[in-house]
Amino acid sequence: MHDDDRPESPHVLWACVEEGFHVGSRGGDFLGYVDRQPSGEYRAFDARSSVIGDFSILAEATAAVSAASPDDDAPSAEDLQGTVR
């Protein structure tokens, strides 16, 4: 099987880019992020940086981002290739 023949993964990949800041993606598409607040809560954001909610534990916040329904018109990573924003 070639890399190009692999189906997109239904699993969400989470990366901790810095302490308290986690970014989620699925199949190369950005889903959103979680940012730990000074209060200790985890604030979840969707792919357009809209607040989903505040959560007491990281697992709840990442689950909320993963479950958030993307807009039908939200650009995918493929749509944004070569785009400067």
Image: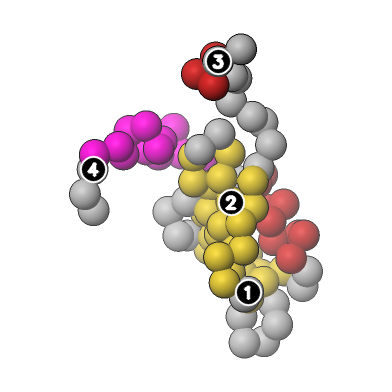
User: Circle 3 sits in a helix, a strand or a loop, which is it?
Assistant: loop
Which circle, 4 or 3, is nearer the viewer?
3
Front one among 69 and 32: 32
Residue at which label 2 appears: 24
Q: Which residue is mark 1?
A: 20
Q: Which residue type carries mark 1?
A: Gly
Coordinates of residue 82 in the picture (x, y in percent): 24, 39
Marks 1 and 3 close (CB-CB < 8 Å): no
Amino acid residing under circle 2:
Gly
Q: Nearer the viewer, residue 74 or 1?
A: 1
Q: Earlier in the sequence, mark 1 or mark 3?
A: 3
Q: Position of residue 74 (x, y in %)?
A: 40, 39
Residues under numbered marks 1 and 2 in contact, where contact means CB atoms less than 8 Å apart: no
As measured in the structure, the alpha-carbon distance from the residue carrying label 1 to the one carrying label 2 is 13 Å
Quadrant in the picture for the N terminus = top right
The kind of secondary structure element at disc 4 is: loop
Residue drawn at x 45%, y 60% is 49
| Quadrant of the image occupied by residue 10 | top right
Vertical comparison of 6 with 44: above or below: above
Is residue 8 on the magenta stretch?
A: no
Instruction: Give the crowd class for mark 2: few <14, some 14-19, many >=20 residues within 10 Å.
Output: many
Mark 4 → mark 3, Cα distance in angstroms: 27 Å
- The stretch in magenta equals 70-82
Residue ID for mark 3: 2
